[in-house]
Amino acid sequence: MRVYMFSDGDALARAAAKEAASKIRDAIAGSGRARIIAATGNSQLAFLDALTRTPDLDWSKVEMFHLDEYIGLPAEHPASFRRYLQERLIRPTGMTAVHLIDGERDPIDVCRAVGGEVSAAPIDVALVGIGENGHLAFNDPPADFDTEEPYLIVRLDEACRRQQAGEGWFASIDDVPERAITMSIRQILKSRTILAVVPEARKAPAVRLCLEGDISPMAPASILRTHADTSLFLDAESSALLAAHPDPSSLDCARDDPERIRRVEG
């Protein structure tokens, strides 16, 4: 795993968007299309804004899957991840090849249908985040590291639901659905390249567990250390608890600056 640290969230977002665009272009050049996975949430807002503004990226050749969706939440609800992606990625780019998780249909049927679509060919680039409880997608601890099912029905833990309410998507934790559909850990790991965008101080404990703790289902994002091509993008706040945390004033957004690159092995 390559870890890149930046002085602030804007610098992180620009660098991550530049890297994501490069990987998407490479996939299109190699096979005529790019299959990607897109994450959602407050931590992805600046990154997706920068990515959609990137010039010379042929979105007509991009096929997109998303990571997770609440069960039973209407698509027009402000917290719906379908709505989030429509507003922040699909409409701004004009992409048409999209596979959205419909949380209002029978979840077993949805898992089967979208699972078949995502399994039809390799994913080139997975754009992910890390939750405050260390989750990847909605794989809360203890996460299932073994299932080969592409999508799962899961019950969200209290920490995850508190995060969703804390980010302002719901009025209170009581309004957050208890169940969701999520892409599985092993399906995420099947992606050729994974880019994890993780800004903000509230993510610092999860980042420390991901990088410095054991690789464990209790710290789901720690599994990223086993992937052959994963890059983790941090800012000064999200990297603040790392043992090798540098002086924030020394960080910049130069992509090839070796002073702020860590390589973390599984």
Image: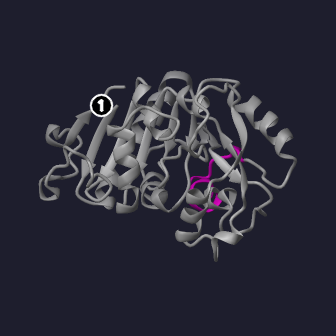
Per the image, label 1 sits on a secondary structure element best described as loop
Quick one: label 1, few (<14), some, or many (20+) residues within 10 Å?
A: few
Q: How many marks?
A: 1
Q: Amino acid at mark 1?
A: Val
Q: Is residue 209 left or right of residue 162?
A: left
Which quadrant: the N terminus? Answer: top left
Residue 107 x/y as whole percent: 82, 45
Magenta stretch bounds? 86-100
Query: Is residue 60 a member of the stretch shown in magenta?
Result: no
Which quadrant: the C terminus? Answer: top left
- Does residue 129 sit above or below 113 in this rendering? below
* Residue at left offset 22%, top offset 57%: 7
Is residue 97 something that shows in the picture? no
* Residue at left offset 57%, top offset 55%: 89
Residue annotated with mark 1 = 264
Give the quarter of the image for residue 263.
top left
Is residue 114 something that shows in the picture? yes
Residue 190 x/y as whole percent: 56, 25
